[in-house]
Image (spheres, rainbow, N blue to C red):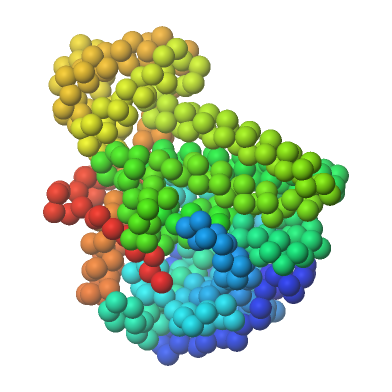
């Protein structure tokens, strides 16, 4: 059952109506049938002419009024008071078989009141990238927006070159961002902030519904900070680099939002940066926990009028939340990374072992994913040659391996549990940057989706071997390395 989005129910201050911008020849390229079934959507209808026309933004879904959401945001540290959906529209909502509501948004659907001179369109390559990476994140068990479909428009998009136009159909629990709160805070609209808090609690944090209204803003800040600490820790564990953690890309729901210039590290390097627009390394791989905390501090500023009437009191309370987030983030990062070596924060010497391993990996420029999967196979107690040792090429690696195996034997967990933990913490397959680029080039230049489909096949079960496609697990050769990624706008 399609309905208007919840913002119609709360306040028209949260959006601007959008006139549809029909495309010439919409064609369904990818349909996520598994997701469609989970959401209770009719696959036959989605593939029909009527369904494709709705997914392309050519016709309005029955019972809905498309809108562009309003928000502001800090972009690379600079506050922009008006951003909003410049190339996206929220079609409406649907309810799945469990009764949960979810939002359907079209990305690349044309101009909106927030387009600021842009064409509002998207190119095929970046939309396929978001589809592939968001599905991988789902399979990793990391909270994420999902991709329901990709369609081509039959129209060109002009960027550095001429590219085929496309639309991504995105599904999310919520598209409310830190920047949404900043938008109303910048206007001094305290009533809108209060409505927004109530709405986000209702949608994404129902366990806070019983909190007294006067305390709800602070409780929401605390819960959102915790959720984002664990989200970024999960990113770290698979080597994911978001690339553009501006506050307009930080979703209050804790879902990974916006896969523009994202990447996965190859050689382990905390300072790794891929995004072409992150020239200062603000959102480097190892800096992401700090930037999540920075975003939550900006949320605290926006919520200040609701936290307490007295500014000093509000600031003290908010600072307490941000400080707790720092401690939570450290524990989350430690827990996620220790799982990758089969240990826990309670195991004696575990953190020292992890730090030494990461230091060796950084010195050896060893592949992040392959090193950890090889470690899972390193069960020779005498330190003889293994794929793990070959990754590090360090004399001290053999000694480290022996100490690690001693630590495993002293762990409270049994050997089978440790193996299971490491297997679930260390995917064999990630969306390697060079494989994504090869797949997108084939799709855009040759119209072939074979490489995209192969990537999706292994990434739907990234912890399992796929004998036919094991080459997709290999690190890039020097000439295959991707050094920069682009946001696609």
Seen in the picture, residue 444 relative to 75 is either above or below; the reply is below
In the rendered image, residue 92, in percent from the top left (x then y), is placed at 64, 72
Looking at the picture, tell me which residue is in the foreground, 222 or 468: 222
Residue 24 in sight here:
yes
Residue 450 lies, in percent from the top left, at 26, 64
Q: Residue at x 30, y 40 (%)?
A: 269
Please say whether residue 141 is visible from this viewpoint. no
Q: Is residue 152 above or below residue 438?
A: below
**Residue 336 horizontal side relative to residue 341, left or right:** right
State which quadrant residue 267 falls in: top left
Quadrant including the C terminus: bottom left
Residue at the extreme bottom: 24
Identity of the residue drawn at 68% across and 51% down: 301
Which quarter of the image is occupied by the N terminus?
A: bottom right
14 or 433: nearer the viewer: 14
Residue displayed at 37% across by 24% down: 354
Q: State whether residue 423 is above or below residue 142.
A: above
Q: Count every numbered label the image shows and give the total.
A: 0
Q: Residue 260, how many percent across, how many down? A: 41, 62
Q: Is residue 382 left or right of residue 56?
A: left
Between 35 and 404, the one nearer to me in the picture: 404
Please give the name of the residue rendered at 32% of the width and 16% of the height, measured from the top-left corner: 404
Q: Nearer the viewer, residue 453 or 422?
A: 422
Picture layout, residue 412 above or below residue 229: above
The residue sitting at the front extreme is: 312
Relative to 465, 11 lies left or right = right
Q: Residue 311: x percent and y percent? A: 78, 47
Question: In the figure, residue 154 lies in which quadrant?
Answer: bottom left
């Amino acid at each position: 059952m399609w309905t208007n989005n919840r913002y119609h129910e709360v306040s028209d201050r949260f959006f601007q109506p959008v006139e549809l911008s029909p495309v010439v020849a919409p064609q369904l390229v990818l349909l996520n049938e598994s997701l469609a079934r989970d959401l209770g959507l009719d696959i036959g209808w989605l593939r029909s002419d009527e369904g494709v026309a709705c997914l392309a933004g050519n016709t309005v879904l029955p019972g809905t009024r498309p809108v562009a959401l309003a928000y502001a945001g800090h972009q690379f540290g600079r506050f922009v008071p008006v951003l909003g959906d410049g190339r996206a529209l929220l079609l409406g909502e649907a309810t799945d078989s469990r009764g949960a509501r979810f939002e359907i948004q079209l990305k690349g659907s044309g101009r909106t009141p927030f387009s600021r001179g842009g064409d509002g369109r998207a190119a095929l390559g970046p939309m396929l990238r978001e589809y592939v990476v968001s599905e991988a994140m789902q399979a990793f068990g990391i909270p994420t927006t999902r991709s329901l479909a990709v369609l081509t428009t039959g129209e060109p998009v002009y960027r550095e070159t001429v590219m085929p136009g496309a639309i991504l159909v995105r599904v999310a629990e919520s598209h409310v961002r830190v920047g949404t709160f900043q938008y109303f805070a910048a206007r001094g609209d305290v009533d809108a902030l209060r409505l927004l808090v109530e709405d986000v609690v209702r949608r994404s944090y129902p366990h806070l519904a019983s909190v007294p209204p006067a305390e709800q803003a602070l409780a929401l800040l605390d819960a959102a900070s915790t959720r984002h600490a664990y989200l970024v820790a999960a990113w770290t564990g698979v080597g994911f680099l978001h690339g553009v953690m501006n506050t307009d890309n930080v979703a209050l729901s804790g879902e990974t939002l916006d896969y523009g210039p994202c990447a996965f590290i190859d050689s382990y390097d905390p300072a790794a940066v891929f995004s072409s627009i992150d020239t200062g390394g603000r959102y480097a791989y190892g800096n992401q926990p700090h930037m999540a905390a920075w975003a939550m501090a900006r949320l605290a500023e926006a919520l200040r009028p609701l936290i307490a009437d007295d500014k000093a009191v509000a600031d003290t309370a908010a600072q307490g939340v941000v400080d707790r987030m720092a401690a939570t983030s450290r524990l989350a990062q430690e827990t996620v990374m220790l799982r990758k070596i089969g240990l826990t924060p309670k195991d004696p010497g575990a953190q020292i072992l992890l730090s030494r391993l990461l230091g060796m990996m950084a010195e050896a420029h060893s592949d992040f994913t392959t090193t950890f999967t090889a470690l899972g196979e390193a069960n020779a107690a005498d330190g003889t040659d293994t794929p793990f040792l070959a990754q590090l090429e360090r004399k001290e690696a053999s000694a480290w391996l022996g100490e690690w195996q001693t630590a495993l034997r002293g762990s409270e967990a049994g050997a089978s549990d440790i193996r299971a933990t490491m297997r679930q913490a260390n995917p064999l397959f990630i969306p390697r940057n060079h494989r994504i680029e090869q797949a997108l080039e084939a799709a855009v230049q040759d119209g072939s989706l074979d490489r995209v489909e192969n990537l999706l096949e292994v990434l739907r079960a990234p912890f399992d071997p796929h004998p036919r496609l094991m080459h997709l697990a290999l690190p890039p050769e020097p000439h295959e390395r991707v050094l920069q990624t682009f946001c696609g706008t």
